[in-house]
Image (spheres, rainbow, N blue to C red):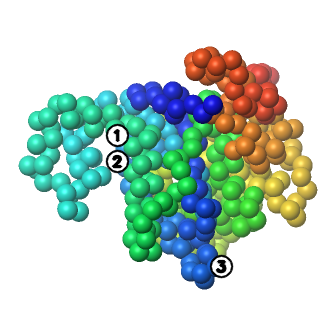
Amino acid sequence: MALPRSKYVRDGQEGVYHCFNRCVRRAFLCGFDATTGRDFSHRKVWMVDRLRQLSAIFAIEVCAYSIMMNHYHLILRVLPDLVALWSDREVAIRWLTLFPHHGEPPTESQIDALVNCSERIAELRRRLGSLSWFMAGLDEFIARAANKEDHVKGRFWESRFKCQALLDDAAIAACMVYVDLNLIRAGLATTPEDSDFTSIQERIRAWYKESTIHRSSESKMPNTEDATELSNAIPEYRQANAPVDPTPSTCWLCPIQSDASRRGILDMTDAEYFDLVDRSGRILRADKRGAIDPDLVPILLRIQANPKQWQDTISFFGSRFRLAAGLLSNLRHFANQLGRQWLTGVASARAAFSASPPQSA
Protein backbone atom coordinates (compact mmCIF):
# COMPACT_ATOMS: atom_id res chain seq x y z
CA MET A 1 0.00 0.00 0.00
CA ALA A 2 1.33 3.44 -0.91
CA LEU A 3 2.30 5.69 1.97
CA PRO A 4 1.24 9.37 1.95
CA ARG A 5 4.27 11.58 1.55
CA SER A 6 3.21 13.64 4.56
CA LYS A 7 3.98 10.60 6.74
CA TYR A 8 7.72 10.79 6.05
CA VAL A 9 8.29 14.32 4.70
CA ARG A 10 7.13 16.46 7.58
CA ASP A 11 7.02 20.24 7.64
CA GLY A 12 9.46 21.75 10.10
CA GLN A 13 11.93 18.84 9.97
CA GLU A 14 15.27 19.01 8.19
CA GLY A 15 15.81 16.32 5.63
CA VAL A 16 17.53 15.40 2.37
CA TYR A 17 15.36 13.95 -0.38
CA HIS A 18 15.80 12.41 -3.81
CA CYS A 19 12.93 13.72 -5.95
CA PHE A 20 12.18 12.69 -9.52
CA ASN A 21 9.43 12.87 -12.11
CA ARG A 22 8.79 11.80 -15.68
CA CYS A 23 6.99 13.39 -18.62
CA VAL A 24 3.55 12.05 -19.46
CA ARG A 25 3.58 8.88 -21.58
CA ARG A 26 7.38 9.01 -21.30
CA ALA A 27 7.44 11.29 -24.35
CA PHE A 28 10.56 13.28 -25.15
CA LEU A 29 9.04 16.56 -24.07
CA CYS A 30 12.39 17.90 -22.83
CA GLY A 31 14.55 16.55 -25.65
CA PHE A 32 14.46 15.67 -29.32
CA ASP A 33 11.24 14.06 -30.51
CA ALA A 34 12.09 11.87 -33.50
CA THR A 35 8.40 11.42 -34.35
CA THR A 36 7.71 15.10 -34.92
CA GLY A 37 11.27 16.22 -35.60
CA ARG A 38 10.99 18.93 -32.93
CA ASP A 39 13.73 19.68 -30.43
CA PHE A 40 12.54 20.60 -26.93
CA SER A 41 16.00 20.75 -25.34
CA HIS A 42 15.53 24.43 -24.47
CA ARG A 43 13.11 23.30 -21.78
CA LYS A 44 16.06 21.88 -19.87
CA VAL A 45 17.34 25.45 -19.62
CA TRP A 46 13.92 26.47 -18.27
CA MET A 47 14.21 23.84 -15.57
CA VAL A 48 17.72 24.77 -14.45
CA ASP A 49 16.81 28.49 -14.39
CA ARG A 50 13.69 27.72 -12.39
CA LEU A 51 15.63 25.59 -9.92
CA ARG A 52 18.10 28.42 -9.41
CA GLN A 53 15.26 30.86 -8.78
CA LEU A 54 13.41 28.58 -6.37
CA SER A 55 16.55 27.80 -4.37
CA ALA A 56 17.07 31.55 -3.88
CA ILE A 57 13.51 31.96 -2.55
CA PHE A 58 12.83 28.80 -0.52
CA ALA A 59 14.72 27.50 2.50
CA ILE A 60 15.60 24.51 0.35
CA GLU A 61 18.99 23.82 -1.24
CA VAL A 62 19.63 21.96 -4.49
CA CYS A 63 22.42 19.44 -3.84
CA ALA A 64 22.34 17.65 -7.19
CA TYR A 65 20.29 17.57 -10.36
CA SER A 66 20.14 15.85 -13.72
CA ILE A 67 17.73 16.94 -16.45
CA MET A 68 17.13 14.19 -19.00
CA MET A 69 15.02 14.10 -22.17
CA ASN A 70 11.89 12.72 -20.50
CA HIS A 71 12.57 12.87 -16.77
CA TYR A 72 14.62 14.59 -14.10
CA HIS A 73 16.33 13.82 -10.78
CA LEU A 74 16.89 16.24 -7.89
CA ILE A 75 18.48 15.98 -4.46
CA LEU A 76 17.10 18.66 -2.16
CA ARG A 77 17.89 19.60 1.44
CA VAL A 78 15.10 21.22 3.48
CA LEU A 79 16.33 23.75 6.07
CA PRO A 80 13.49 24.70 8.46
CA ASP A 81 15.92 26.44 10.85
CA LEU A 82 16.70 28.92 8.07
CA VAL A 83 13.03 29.83 7.64
CA ALA A 84 12.78 30.60 11.34
CA LEU A 85 15.54 33.21 11.03
CA TRP A 86 13.73 35.22 8.37
CA SER A 87 11.86 38.36 9.41
CA ASP A 88 8.20 38.76 8.52
CA ARG A 89 9.22 41.32 5.91
CA GLU A 90 11.67 38.91 4.29
CA VAL A 91 9.00 36.20 4.16
CA ALA A 92 6.64 38.64 2.44
CA ILE A 93 9.25 39.74 -0.11
CA ARG A 94 10.20 36.16 -0.93
CA TRP A 95 6.58 35.10 -1.44
CA LEU A 96 5.72 38.12 -3.59
CA THR A 97 8.85 37.47 -5.65
CA LEU A 98 7.68 33.90 -6.23
CA PHE A 99 4.13 35.00 -7.10
CA PRO A 100 4.42 38.60 -8.38
CA HIS A 101 1.33 40.66 -9.13
CA HIS A 102 1.12 41.10 -12.91
CA GLY A 103 4.76 40.06 -13.19
CA GLU A 104 5.99 43.20 -11.42
CA PRO A 105 8.41 43.39 -8.43
CA PRO A 106 6.61 43.68 -5.08
CA THR A 107 5.67 47.19 -3.96
CA GLU A 108 6.00 48.54 -0.45
CA SER A 109 2.22 48.57 -0.04
CA GLN A 110 1.98 44.90 -1.04
CA ILE A 111 4.80 43.96 1.36
CA ASP A 112 3.25 45.93 4.23
CA ALA A 113 -0.17 44.37 3.63
CA LEU A 114 1.32 40.90 4.04
CA VAL A 115 3.51 41.80 7.01
CA ASN A 116 0.47 43.15 8.87
CA CYS A 117 -1.31 39.79 8.56
CA SER A 118 0.45 37.56 11.07
CA GLU A 119 -1.58 34.42 10.31
CA ARG A 120 -0.86 34.72 6.59
CA ILE A 121 2.86 35.25 7.26
CA ALA A 122 2.95 32.13 9.45
CA GLU A 123 1.39 30.11 6.64
CA LEU A 124 3.77 31.52 4.02
CA ARG A 125 6.73 30.83 6.30
CA ARG A 126 5.65 27.18 6.43
CA ARG A 127 5.25 27.03 2.65
CA LEU A 128 8.70 28.52 2.01
CA GLY A 129 10.18 25.58 3.91
CA SER A 130 7.95 22.97 2.28
CA LEU A 131 9.31 20.39 -0.14
CA SER A 132 5.87 20.00 -1.75
CA TRP A 133 5.54 23.73 -2.43
CA PHE A 134 9.05 23.84 -3.88
CA MET A 135 8.30 20.94 -6.23
CA ALA A 136 4.92 22.44 -7.19
CA GLY A 137 6.75 25.66 -8.03
CA LEU A 138 8.97 23.68 -10.40
CA ASP A 139 6.55 21.19 -12.00
CA GLU A 140 3.61 23.55 -12.45
CA PHE A 141 5.79 26.33 -13.87
CA ILE A 142 7.38 24.02 -16.47
CA ALA A 143 4.06 22.35 -17.36
CA ARG A 144 2.34 25.69 -17.98
CA ALA A 145 5.23 27.01 -20.07
CA ALA A 146 5.46 23.81 -22.15
CA ASN A 147 1.69 23.61 -22.73
CA LYS A 148 1.61 27.27 -23.75
CA GLU A 149 4.41 26.65 -26.23
CA ASP A 150 2.58 23.62 -27.67
CA HIS A 151 -0.85 25.30 -27.63
CA VAL A 152 -2.32 22.38 -25.68
CA LYS A 153 -3.92 21.66 -22.31
CA GLY A 154 -3.56 18.73 -19.95
CA ARG A 155 -0.81 16.87 -18.17
CA PHE A 156 2.86 17.46 -18.83
CA TRP A 157 4.11 15.23 -15.96
CA GLU A 158 2.74 11.72 -15.62
CA SER A 159 2.08 12.10 -11.87
CA ARG A 160 3.09 13.96 -8.76
CA PHE A 161 6.80 13.81 -8.10
CA LYS A 162 8.21 10.73 -6.37
CA CYS A 163 10.42 11.06 -3.35
CA GLN A 164 13.00 9.08 -1.34
CA ALA A 165 14.36 10.16 2.04
CA LEU A 166 18.17 10.00 2.24
CA LEU A 167 18.87 9.17 5.85
CA ASP A 168 22.65 9.56 6.19
CA ASP A 169 25.88 10.57 4.46
CA ALA A 170 26.30 7.16 2.85
CA ALA A 171 22.91 7.38 1.13
CA ILE A 172 23.39 11.05 0.19
CA ALA A 173 26.81 10.41 -1.40
CA ALA A 174 25.63 7.34 -3.31
CA CYS A 175 22.49 9.05 -4.56
CA MET A 176 24.38 12.19 -5.61
CA VAL A 177 26.78 10.09 -7.67
CA TYR A 178 23.81 8.18 -9.10
CA VAL A 179 22.17 11.45 -10.15
CA ASP A 180 25.35 13.04 -11.50
CA LEU A 181 26.15 9.98 -13.61
CA ASN A 182 22.73 9.74 -15.28
CA LEU A 183 23.97 10.82 -18.70
CA ILE A 184 27.03 8.55 -18.56
CA ARG A 185 24.88 5.61 -17.50
CA ALA A 186 22.53 6.34 -20.42
CA GLY A 187 25.43 6.54 -22.88
CA LEU A 188 24.77 10.23 -23.62
CA ALA A 189 28.09 11.51 -22.21
CA THR A 190 31.54 10.05 -21.63
CA THR A 191 32.83 12.27 -18.82
CA PRO A 192 31.26 14.28 -15.97
CA GLU A 193 32.33 17.62 -17.47
CA ASP A 194 30.58 16.69 -20.74
CA SER A 195 27.32 15.80 -18.96
CA ASP A 196 25.04 18.68 -19.94
CA PHE A 197 22.35 19.86 -17.55
CA THR A 198 23.81 18.10 -14.53
CA SER A 199 25.03 19.46 -11.23
CA ILE A 200 28.45 17.84 -11.63
CA GLN A 201 29.09 19.79 -14.84
CA GLU A 202 27.98 23.00 -13.15
CA ARG A 203 30.22 22.37 -10.15
CA ILE A 204 33.26 21.64 -12.34
CA ARG A 205 32.68 24.81 -14.37
CA ALA A 206 32.33 26.91 -11.20
CA TRP A 207 35.53 25.34 -9.84
CA TYR A 208 37.38 26.18 -13.05
CA LYS A 209 36.15 29.78 -13.08
CA GLU A 210 37.19 30.20 -9.45
CA SER A 211 40.66 28.83 -10.19
CA THR A 212 40.90 31.07 -13.27
CA ILE A 213 40.08 34.15 -11.19
CA HIS A 214 42.54 32.99 -8.54
CA ARG A 215 45.31 32.60 -11.10
CA SER A 216 44.58 36.00 -12.60
CA SER A 217 44.59 37.82 -9.28
CA GLU A 218 47.52 35.99 -7.69
CA SER A 219 50.36 35.17 -10.03
CA LYS A 220 48.86 34.34 -13.45
CA MET A 221 50.89 31.13 -13.31
CA PRO A 222 49.07 28.18 -14.94
CA ASN A 223 49.95 25.59 -12.31
CA THR A 224 48.37 26.72 -9.07
CA GLU A 225 47.56 24.31 -6.28
CA ASP A 226 43.83 24.50 -7.07
CA ALA A 227 44.37 23.90 -10.78
CA THR A 228 46.64 20.92 -10.07
CA GLU A 229 44.10 19.46 -7.65
CA LEU A 230 41.33 19.77 -10.23
CA SER A 231 43.51 18.20 -12.92
CA ASN A 232 44.19 15.28 -10.62
CA ALA A 233 40.53 14.95 -9.72
CA ILE A 234 39.30 15.03 -13.32
CA PRO A 235 42.13 13.70 -15.52
CA GLU A 236 40.29 14.32 -18.79
CA TYR A 237 39.32 17.90 -17.91
CA ARG A 238 41.24 20.04 -20.42
CA GLN A 239 41.97 23.26 -18.56
CA ALA A 240 44.13 24.72 -21.31
CA ASN A 241 41.26 24.66 -23.82
CA ALA A 242 38.40 25.53 -21.50
CA PRO A 243 36.73 28.87 -22.26
CA VAL A 244 36.67 31.58 -19.63
CA ASP A 245 33.08 32.47 -18.80
CA PRO A 246 32.68 36.14 -17.76
CA THR A 247 29.62 35.36 -15.60
CA PRO A 248 29.99 35.17 -11.78
CA SER A 249 31.81 32.02 -10.71
CA THR A 250 30.05 31.33 -7.41
CA CYS A 251 28.03 28.13 -7.69
CA TRP A 252 24.40 28.44 -6.58
CA LEU A 253 24.22 24.79 -5.58
CA CYS A 254 24.59 23.59 -2.01
CA PRO A 255 28.36 23.35 -1.39
CA ILE A 256 29.97 19.93 -1.13
CA GLN A 257 32.08 20.90 1.88
CA SER A 258 31.15 23.35 4.63
CA ASP A 259 32.79 26.78 4.63
CA ALA A 260 32.55 29.89 6.77
CA SER A 261 29.26 31.01 5.23
CA ARG A 262 27.38 27.80 4.33
CA ARG A 263 26.99 24.24 5.57
CA GLY A 264 28.04 21.61 3.06
CA ILE A 265 26.25 18.41 2.16
CA LEU A 266 29.18 15.94 2.42
CA ASP A 267 32.26 15.49 4.57
CA MET A 268 34.70 15.72 1.66
CA THR A 269 36.31 18.38 -0.50
CA ASP A 270 35.10 19.35 -3.95
CA ALA A 271 38.12 17.61 -5.48
CA GLU A 272 37.37 14.39 -3.59
CA TYR A 273 33.78 14.46 -4.80
CA PHE A 274 34.86 15.13 -8.39
CA ASP A 275 37.26 12.22 -8.08
CA LEU A 276 34.51 9.98 -6.70
CA VAL A 277 32.17 10.83 -9.58
CA ASP A 278 34.88 10.60 -12.25
CA ARG A 279 36.22 7.21 -11.15
CA SER A 280 32.67 5.88 -10.66
CA GLY A 281 31.78 7.05 -14.16
CA ARG A 282 34.71 5.14 -15.61
CA ILE A 283 33.38 1.95 -14.03
CA LEU A 284 30.08 2.43 -15.84
CA ARG A 285 31.50 3.19 -19.27
CA ALA A 286 31.26 0.33 -21.74
CA ASP A 287 34.86 0.80 -22.91
CA LYS A 288 36.25 0.51 -19.38
CA ARG A 289 36.68 -2.56 -17.24
CA GLY A 290 34.11 -2.91 -14.47
CA ALA A 291 36.48 -2.86 -11.53
CA ILE A 292 36.87 -0.57 -8.54
CA ASP A 293 39.95 1.62 -8.74
CA PRO A 294 42.10 1.03 -5.61
CA ASP A 295 42.34 4.81 -5.15
CA LEU A 296 38.56 4.93 -4.80
CA VAL A 297 38.36 2.42 -1.96
CA PRO A 298 39.46 4.76 0.89
CA ILE A 299 36.84 7.35 -0.09
CA LEU A 300 34.12 4.70 -0.21
CA LEU A 301 35.08 3.30 3.17
CA ARG A 302 35.04 6.77 4.68
CA ILE A 303 31.46 7.40 3.55
CA GLN A 304 30.51 3.92 4.79
CA ALA A 305 29.90 2.45 1.33
CA ASN A 306 30.79 -1.13 0.45
CA PRO A 307 33.37 -0.99 -2.41
CA LYS A 308 32.34 -4.43 -3.68
CA GLN A 309 28.76 -3.22 -4.15
CA TRP A 310 29.51 0.33 -5.30
CA GLN A 311 28.91 -0.30 -9.01
CA ASP A 312 25.48 -1.81 -8.32
CA THR A 313 24.64 0.92 -5.81
CA ILE A 314 25.25 3.80 -8.22
CA SER A 315 23.73 1.94 -11.17
CA PHE A 316 20.45 0.84 -9.60
CA PHE A 317 19.95 3.25 -6.68
CA GLY A 318 16.52 4.34 -7.86
CA SER A 319 15.12 0.82 -8.05
CA ARG A 320 16.88 -0.69 -5.01
CA PHE A 321 15.34 1.77 -2.54
CA ARG A 322 11.79 3.10 -2.34
CA LEU A 323 10.68 5.40 0.49
CA ALA A 324 14.13 5.86 1.96
CA ALA A 325 17.78 4.89 1.65
CA GLY A 326 20.58 4.70 4.19
CA LEU A 327 22.50 2.50 6.59
CA LEU A 328 20.57 -0.54 7.78
CA SER A 329 20.22 0.87 11.32
CA ASN A 330 18.84 4.17 9.99
CA LEU A 331 16.45 2.40 7.65
CA ARG A 332 15.09 0.31 10.52
CA HIS A 333 14.68 3.41 12.69
CA PHE A 334 12.87 5.13 9.81
CA ALA A 335 10.52 2.12 9.47
CA ASN A 336 9.77 2.23 13.21
CA GLN A 337 8.86 5.92 12.94
CA LEU A 338 6.36 5.04 10.23
CA GLY A 339 4.94 2.16 12.26
CA ARG A 340 6.20 -0.43 9.81
CA GLN A 341 8.18 -3.57 10.45
CA TRP A 342 9.82 -3.71 7.01
CA LEU A 343 10.70 -1.43 4.09
CA THR A 344 11.78 -2.14 0.52
CA GLY A 345 15.53 -1.65 0.44
CA VAL A 346 16.58 -3.35 3.67
CA ALA A 347 18.52 -6.05 1.82
CA SER A 348 20.06 -3.44 -0.48
CA ALA A 349 21.11 -1.32 2.50
CA ARG A 350 22.74 -4.31 4.13
CA ALA A 351 24.76 -4.97 0.96
CA ALA A 352 25.51 -1.39 -0.12
CA PHE A 353 26.51 0.29 3.13
CA SER A 354 28.86 -0.62 5.98
CA ALA A 355 27.70 -1.08 9.53
CA SER A 356 30.36 1.27 10.91
CA PRO A 357 32.94 3.74 9.60
CA PRO A 358 36.56 2.54 9.24
CA GLN A 359 38.70 2.88 12.35
CA SER A 360 41.55 5.40 12.13
CA ALA A 361 45.02 4.00 12.49
Quadrant where the image shows the N terminus: top right
Instruction: Look at the numbered disc 3 and give the secondary structure of its residue.
Output: loop
Q: Residues within 10 Å of mark 3 (few under 14, many from 20)?
A: few
Amino acid residing under circle 2: Ile
Residue topped by disc 3: 34
- The answer to whether residue 229 is visible is no
Q: Residue at x 63, y 38 (%)?
A: 172
Q: Name the front one of labels 3 and 1.
A: 3
Q: Residue at x 75, y 27 (%)?
A: 346
> Residue 198, which numbered label?
none
The mark that comes first in sequence, 2 or 1, is: 2
Amino acid residing under circle 1: Leu
Cα separation between marks 2 and 1 = 7 Å
Q: Residue at x 53, y 50 (%)?
A: 159
Q: Residues within 10 Å of mark 1 (few under 14, many from 20)?
A: many
Relative to residue 346, is residue 244 depicted above or below?
Answer: below
The mark that comes first in sequence, 2 or 3, is: 3
Residue placed furthest toward the bottom: 37
Residue 91: image x %, image y %? 25, 40
Instruction: Look at the numbered disc 2 and give the secondary structure of its residue.
Output: helix
Amino acid residing under circle 3: Ala
Q: Name the front one of labels 2 and 3.
A: 3
Does residue 14 appear left or right of residue 81 in this picture?
Answer: right
> Residue 128, which numbered label?
1
Q: Name the front one of labels 2 and 1.
A: 1
Residue 169: image x %, image y %? 64, 32
Residue topped by disc 2: 57
